[in-house]
Image: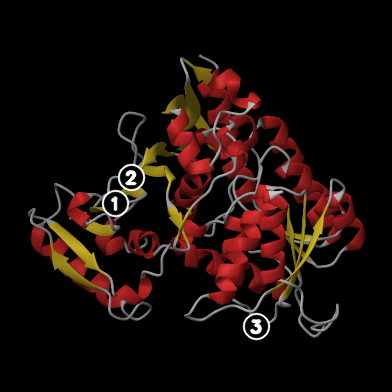
Amino acid sequence: MRRISLLMTALAATAFAGPAGADDTRRFKIVTLDPGHFHAALVQKFMYSDVDPTVHVYAPPGPDVEEHLKRIERFNTRAEAPTSWRTQVHLGEDFFERMLAEKNGNIVVIAGNNARKTDYILRSIQAGLNVLADKPMAITPADYRKLEQAFAVAEEKDVLLYDIMTERFEITSILQRELSRDRALFGELTKGSPESPAIVKESVHHFAKEVAGAPLIRPQWFFDVRQEGEGIVDVTTHLVDLVQWQAFPEQALEPSNAKVLSARRWSTPLTPAQFKQVTGADSFPDYLQQDVRDGVLHVYSNGEFTYRLRDVHARISVIWNFEAPPGTGDTHFSTMRGTKAALTIRQGEAENFRPVLYIEKAQDVDAKSFEAAAEAAIKSLQQKYPGVGLSRADSAGIRVVTIPEKYKVGHEAHFAQVTENFLSYLRKGELPHWEVPNMLTKYATIMQAYELSRAK
């Protein structure tokens, strides 16, 4: 009864106002499919000029859709810049077949349980619908083969399939990419080696966190790697994407360009009390019992691998802890080593747990030449990003890129930026020529790491 009550409250708050088709002049209509992850709601944190405010949600009844509807309600009722989404909810075990048959939109947003995600993607594409999907779009090699088929069908049917790569919109990552293209400052990207890669990206996340100002309640299935995916195929999607996007900007890659050299996986333990804190459940469900040892749940949410992309070596690492220390949060480390300088993003205690971009000269580079190149690079960058500057770090030979607060919009806002980007591609009727081959290369790389990590 409690579940029904919660659902009815959420439905009332986001009830559909007005007849179907009231905003037919809007070019794009969103359908949200089985929204089990909070990323589905973040796509709607803001409004879009040519997107119909009525969104159809198709899902099985249960806590996942209840939580989704409550998030949309919070966006609609917040004090600052409230949204005005209207929601029509279609519940039932046949929700997916109904969504395909009724076609109440032309963009399907998919962010939820990853066990069925690739099937959702493929069948939505086969139905002639555009798809904006949360990562990962594939969590097993079998999923990857379906994803290949989905991209082929998308081309035949002239629809677009795109994954939500929010990290491309984080300002330090943007500036790291921009500065790596400045030959006077950075030189050429080094090739590195398996022991000392040219690019290293590490990401630390936490199961307990807040989203949109409220404690995040995660679905119980999120802790089942057979439904969510292991860490080595999940957040690594962002990091592999950044390697490709920064090291080979706007170049089309192929799966054969990537060779995984080593990979490993390990688990994060969760006590019953911790599990209850983040899910609300009093005990581990039956499907997780195979991962419980001595009363503690072990989630294979961590992974690391080293690989070669064309001739550049990179290392990717993803770690999930239960909860961040007070005053901290998720962290990101990224470095790119050039022949003249290294560009490094740190997000630790020294940075007050906010990402900071450092420029450090290579050992054999003259200090005066480095200083002149750094100043010139920032001056050039200011034409595109006014207000960006330079300051000195404590260590000799290291400069800090100073970034105005206006560019630090935060992770949640990046979802709107990705969505706007996707809408711009829909208006043009095509993705950039490199996006599809690079999405396939990204997932092919991750599948190599997945298989190698389990081969031991």
Q: CA distance from mark 2 to mark 1?
A: 6 Å
Q: Quadrant of residue 170?
A: bottom left
Mark 2–mark 1 CB contact (< 8 Å): yes
Residue 421 percent coordinates (x, y)? 59, 69
Disc 2 residue type (three-letter): Ala
User: Which residue appears at 89% of the width and 50% of the height?
Assistant: 97
Q: In the rendered image, which residue does mark 3 sit on? A: 49
- The residue sitting at the front extreme is 1
Helix, strand or loop at mark 3: loop
Q: Nearer the viewer, mark 2 or mark 3?
A: 2
User: Mark 2 and 3 residues: CB-CB less than 8 Å, in contact?
Assistant: no
Mark 2 closeness class: few <14, some 14–19, many ≥20 residues within 10 Å: some
Dot 3 or dot 1, earlier in sequence: 3
In the picture provided, is 47 more to the left or to the right than 178? right
Residue 235 appears in the figure: no
349 shown above or below 404: above
Pointer 2 residue: 324
Q: Gap in Å between the C-alphas at discs 2 and 3?
A: 37 Å
Residue appearing at x 12%, y 59% in the figure? 393
